[in-house]
Image (cartoon, helix red, strand yellow):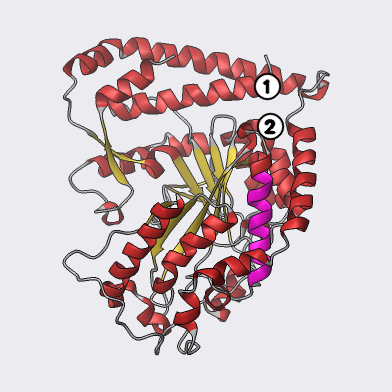
Amino acid sequence: MKLSDIYIQMKSINHKLSLLQLLTQDSTIHTMPHGVSFQNTLLCNLRCPHCQTHGVEEHRKYYNTINMPHEMLTRVAHEVLPTADEYLFTVSGEPLASPNFTQLLLEFFPYCAKIELHTNGTLITPEILTNLIPATKGIHISIDGATQLMVEATRKGAKYKKLLQNIKLLTKTVDLLPDKLKPLIYFGCTILGSNIRELPEIVELAYLLGVPKVYGYFVVVYHEHLNNEDVKNYKPLYNYYHEKAVEAANRLGVFLCLPPPFAGVEASDDSPIGGNNMIIENFPGDYIDKLHARSHIEDIVNIIGAEAIDIQANKIKDVIIDRYDVPKQHVDLSNLFSLGRNYLMLKKMTMYYRKMLKHYKQFLDETIQRGDAKPIKYCESLSKRIYLSPAGEITPCCYIYNPLGNISSDNVKNIWNGDVYNDFRQKFQSDNPFKECINCHNISYLSPAALCHEINSV
């Protein structure tokens, strides 16, 4: 048995134990997080005006100095990743600017946990891609425009042509790889008053660059000098370009997920362009004409050096396949100790899972037979992952600022299965949850019978 096989089985057992805990609401069933979000650095190379942490220069200078101690990062990773499916590096900074980013990818790769990467895309290089792509589950590229004007205004410090080249190099390389090495790639767009008109062109740009999915999110305005970026000020305009973006996505075969149109508001593109308290206060006079010229985006994409990108992509593909897709012909003796230790851990987890399954067999059978049991309130963040701050504080999601433990004085297993975390879970399930959980868009409801079938699956 290979070490990777052991980790995969450990993850599967942890997943089923988590489902059993959720189904039975038995807090004595011990599990581990399925994922961890490391706020390992708050450093960012860009100065996006609408960013909470880096939008104002004074704030940016402060946050760019904050890093998680390397010892803390690796200690938590080595505890959590054997049973976790995924991990993230900073979502408050730029992950590719993380100290020792490539070294960490290589160190964590053997655990068979994939990284979910949120990046502005500007720091992508062929060297980074050779190690990043095989280690990645999904790559979320934050881009808030389709035109050079909009991209360089909303992502200050980014160079438009270079960014498009980086994205095309990524998608071209992924296209050349076997399916098992392909991460998902998608655009994430912050929707602002300034860029509403570019939503259809963002879909078009995604199509031309080979990005199959686009997600959009309304801006949260953190700075008073940008109050007019709030999309609620442009409901008719948003509804109009929402419809146009959906039409473009359907025509091009791009998956598109945007906030729904505003109910009861008639769509209209009759709205002023620019104005005070916006990222772009004065637009060029020919902005609209250029934006709606279909050839405009195509011309831009065509000048990013397709031939050179093809050559680079093939080189990266060859390195990745040689390094990660060729079966090793020798036994790595340095892994024998780790293999034995983790095999014993797997056996222990297997015995514990069988014990819990036997204990709840009648409950599972009755739940399946009943079939119409009340759906279970579910939050993926609370049930599956932890967020670790640079100071070692653990929270259940990025909206909760009240720590449920600190890794400086304890380990993840104790915190995750401890009284404070379990009290939070119970309150979430109650009729009086924490205010941050009320009407949260991440809440869903699961069928108890479906959970039972998944627990019982081989």
Q: Which is nearer the eye, 405 or 5?
A: 5
Secondary structure beneath disc 2? helix
Q: Which residue is mark 2?
A: 110
Q: Amino acid at mark 2?
A: Pro
Q: Amino acid at mark 1?
A: Leu
* Mark toward the start of the polypeptide (2 vs 1): 1
Residue at 68% over, 32% down: 110
Q: Which residue is mark 1?
A: 3
Q: Up-down: is 151 above or below 318?
A: below
Residue 316, given in percent of the width and then of the height, sits at 77, 45
Q: Is residue 6 visible?
A: yes
Determine whether, in the image, residue 226 is placed left or right of residue 451. Answer: right
Let me know if residue 418 is in the magenta part. no
Q: Up-down: is 283 above or below 26?
A: below
Residue at 71% over, 49% down: 129
- Label 2: how many residues lie within 10 Å, few (<14), some (14-19) or many (20+)? some
Our reading of the magenta stretch's main secondary structure is helix
Q: Quadrant of residue 382?
A: top left
The residue range painted magenta reads: 160-174
Secondary structure beneath disc 1? helix
Marks 2,1: beta carbons within 8 A: yes
**CA–CA distance in space, label 2 to label 1:** 8 Å
Q: Quadrant of the N terminus?
A: top right
